[in-house]
Image (cartoon, rainbow, N blue to C red):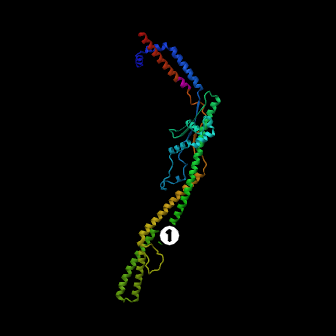
């Protein structure tokens, strides 16, 4: 065989053309009959009609949340929003689910249409005739192929056209129903969880505010900065007065005896000033009456300031969390109660005008070309064989 092919390759162009011209009638007849046969077969082949529905890429699992009114700088907790591609894959998973598939099958009696024995075979047939694809633009297309039978009537074609569009649109409808149900269930669980967390946070906020209030009452805190400044000024004034009284006592003591009423009065005033200064710096003495201090005790100010900052920070944290949970809780209640479509349909499926396959013209052209090549090769081999036979 290889020697024959090699010999044929050595034929000149004119020799090949002469051989083909001698076999022209045979070649043309073969091409004609094969083309005619393929044309007839294509006429009785089942026709496939294709309808497509196109969905817009989802922006997020739910619409813009009320939380978007807050900037990231105001909320320390970043909102988690599903990416478009992830949400699209989620929609595809819903479309491929048994729930959606069985609903479509039962809706249009596809067990009988596919001549299936049971629902399992119908599911396989439907899966084979449905294509889910993410386009370059990010849209999701639902393509449904419906074929007629062999030697079908025109009404069968009309039914196939309409059925392809109906199935594609039913997939969109079921996708919206299931997706809405899932989102509602998710919103219900989220609302319940947020409701419980909201109540816990509200109680925590009340407790934190009560602790801060009690702390301020115990330490007579109105404004730490201004009260500390006033306490320091009062302590300085007392120290100046104490120094003045000590000088006055020294002067009077040189003139009068220690039991003189004036000396005793100066000493009593000096002791009272020292007690007041001690009260400001270290708190009340035991011998003094138990009454509230006018100013915070200076020796305790660092600890008081640290405790106050800690309690205030806890209130701020609980309050920020309270604002966040309140908005989340309200948003979850809105999501639970809403009943709007969750799917953005860009192009609904329309009954196709033309069949998608078989491609009759292409089939005839391809088979005619194959027949021409095969017959031509046969003619060349036959001519070569006769030449070898004549030479021998």
Q: Which picture quadrant has residue 231? A: bottom left
**Residue at position x 50%, y 70% from top?**
214
Horizontal and vertical percent position of residue 306? 43, 66
Q: Report the front residue among 356 and 98.
A: 98
Q: Quadrant of the N terminus?
A: top left
17 relative to 173, above or below: above
Against 3, residue 79 (above or below) is below
Q: Nearer the viewer, residue 66 or 222?
A: 66
Residue 128 location in percent, x, y? 55, 36
Pick out the residue farthest to the front: 117
Query: Can the viewer see residue 348?
Result: no
Residue 384 drawn at (x, y percent)? 44, 14
Looking at the rendered structure, the number of numbered marks drawn on it comes to: 1
- Residue 199 can be seen, yes or no: yes
Q: Hey, which residue is sitting farthest right in the picture?
A: 155
Image: 148 above or below 191: above
Whether 362 is among the magenta residues is yes
Between 191 and 250, which is closer to the camera in this rendering?
A: 191
- Residue 38: x %, y % from top left: 56, 23
Residue at horizontal 48 percent and vertical 20 percent from the top: 374
In this rendering, would 206 be left or right of 162? Answer: left
The part of the chain drawn in magenta is: 360-365
The residue lying at 63 percent from left, 40 percent from top is 107
For residue 219, above or below residue 18: below
Helix, strand or loop: magenta stretch: helix
Q: Is residue 89 magenta?
A: no
Is 355 displayed left or right of 299 in the figure?
right
> What residue sits right under mark 1 in the picture?
214
Q: Quadrant of the C terminus?
A: top left
**Residue 263 in which image quadrant:** bottom left
Q: How many C-alpha atoms fall within 10 Å of the one at disc 1: few (<14), some, or many (≥20)?
A: few
Q: Secondary structure at mark 1?
A: helix
């Amino acid at each position: 065989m290889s020697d024959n092919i090699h010999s044929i390759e050595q034929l000149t162009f004119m020799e090949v053309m002469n051989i083909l011209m001698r076999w022209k009638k045979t070649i043309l007849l073969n091409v004609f009959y094969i083309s005619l046969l393929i044309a007839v077969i294509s006429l009785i082949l089942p026709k496939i009609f294709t309808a497509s529905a196109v969905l817009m890429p989802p922006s997020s699992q739910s619409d813009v949340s009320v939380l978007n009114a807050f900037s990231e700088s105001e909320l320390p907790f970043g909102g988690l929003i599903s990416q478009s591609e992830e949400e699209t894959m989620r929609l595809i998973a819903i479309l491929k689910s048994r729930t959606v598939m069985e609903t479509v099958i039962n809706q249009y009696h596809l067990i009988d249409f596919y001549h299936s024995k049971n629902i399992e075979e119908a599911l396989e047939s439907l899966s084979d005739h449905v294509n889910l694809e993410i386009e370059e633009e990010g849209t999701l297309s639902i393509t449904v192929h419906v074929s007629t039978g062999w030697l079908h009537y025109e009404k069968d074609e009309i039914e196939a056209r309409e059925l392809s569009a109906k199935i594609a649109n039913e997939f969109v409808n079921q996708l919206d129903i299931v997706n809405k149900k899932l989102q509602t269930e998710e919103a219900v669980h989220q609302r319940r969880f947020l409701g419980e967390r909201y109540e816990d946070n509200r109680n925590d906020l009340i407790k934190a505010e009560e602790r801060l209030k009690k702390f301020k009452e115990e330490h007579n805190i109105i404004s730490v900065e201004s009260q500390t400044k006033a306490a320091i000024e009062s302590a300085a004034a007392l120290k100046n007065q104490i120094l003045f009284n000590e000088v006055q006592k020294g002067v009077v003591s040189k003139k009068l005896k220690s039991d003189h009423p004036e000396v005793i009065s100066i000493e009593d005033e000096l002791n009272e000033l020292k007690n007041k200064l001690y009260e400001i710096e270290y708190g009340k003495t035991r011998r003094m009456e138990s009454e509230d201090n006018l100013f915070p005790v200076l020796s305790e100010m660092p600890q008081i300031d640290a405790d106050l900052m800690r309690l205030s920070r806890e209130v701020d944290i609980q309050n920020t969390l309270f604002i966040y949970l309140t908005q989340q809780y309200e948003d979850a209640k809105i999501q639970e109660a809403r009943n709007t479509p969750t799917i953005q349909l860009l192009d609904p499926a329309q009954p196709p005008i033309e069949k998608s396959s078989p491609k009759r013209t292409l089939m005839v052209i391809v088979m005619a070309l194959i027949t021409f090549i095969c017959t031509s090769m046969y003619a060349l081999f036959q001519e070569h064989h006769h030449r070898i036979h004549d030479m021998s």
